[in-house]
Image (cartoon, rainbow, N blue to C red):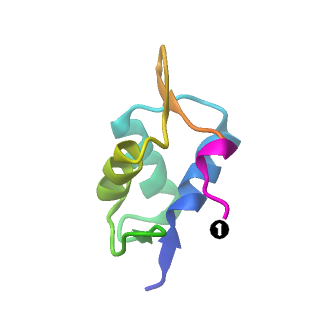
Amino acid sequence: MSSIHGHQVLEMMITSDQPYSTASLIDAITQRFGPDARFHTCSAQDLTAAALVDFLAAKGKFIPTDDGFTTSTSKICQH
């Protein structure tokens, strides 16, 4: 199984134009990429959807809103 870059999740969030909670983002990731999908980032590998969300939150990739959080293109590294 191939690994999906975390940037694709951030891009999915931007395209959806809606706020997420941790649980709703994990659900959206699972629905989009499948329950067995694994993810990687520039500095981590073999992450589950839940582990990816925790990782992205710890890296400051989410923007708090009144209804949860979103992200923006400025949060996606460009290398």
Q: Position of residue 30 (x, y in %)?
A: 42, 56
The extreme bottom residue here reads 1
- Magenta span includes 78: yes
Residue where numbered disc 1 is placed: 79
Of 8 and 30, nearer the camera is: 8
Q: Where is residue 35 in the image (x, y as percent from the top left)?
A: 37, 64
Q: Position of residue 25 (x, y in %)?
A: 43, 42
Q: What residue type is labelled 1?
A: His
Number of numbered labels in the structure image? 1
Magenta-tinted stretch: 73-79
Q: In which quarter of the image is residue 49?
A: bottom left
At a point 32% along the width and 64% down the height, the residue shown is: 48
Quadrant for the N terminus, please. Answer: bottom left
Q: Please tell me whether residue 5 is drawn above or below residue 73 in the rendered image.
A: below
At a point 48% along the width and 37% down the height, the residue shown is: 62
Of 73 and 68, nearer the camera is: 73
At a point 66% along the width and 33% down the height, the residue shown is: 17
Q: Please tell me whether residue 1 is drawn above or below residue 7 in the rendered image.
A: below
The extreme front residue here reads 79
Pointer 1 local density, CA inside 10 Å: few below 14, some 14–19, many at least 20 = few
Q: What element carries label 1?
A: loop
- Magenta span includes 30: no
> Is residue 58 found left or right of 64 in the rendered image?
left
At a point 47% along the width and 32% down the height, the residue shown is: 20
Quadrant for the C terminus, please. Answer: bottom right
Q: Quadrant of residue 23?
A: top left
Q: Where is residue 73 in the image (x, y as percent from the top left)?
A: 68, 45
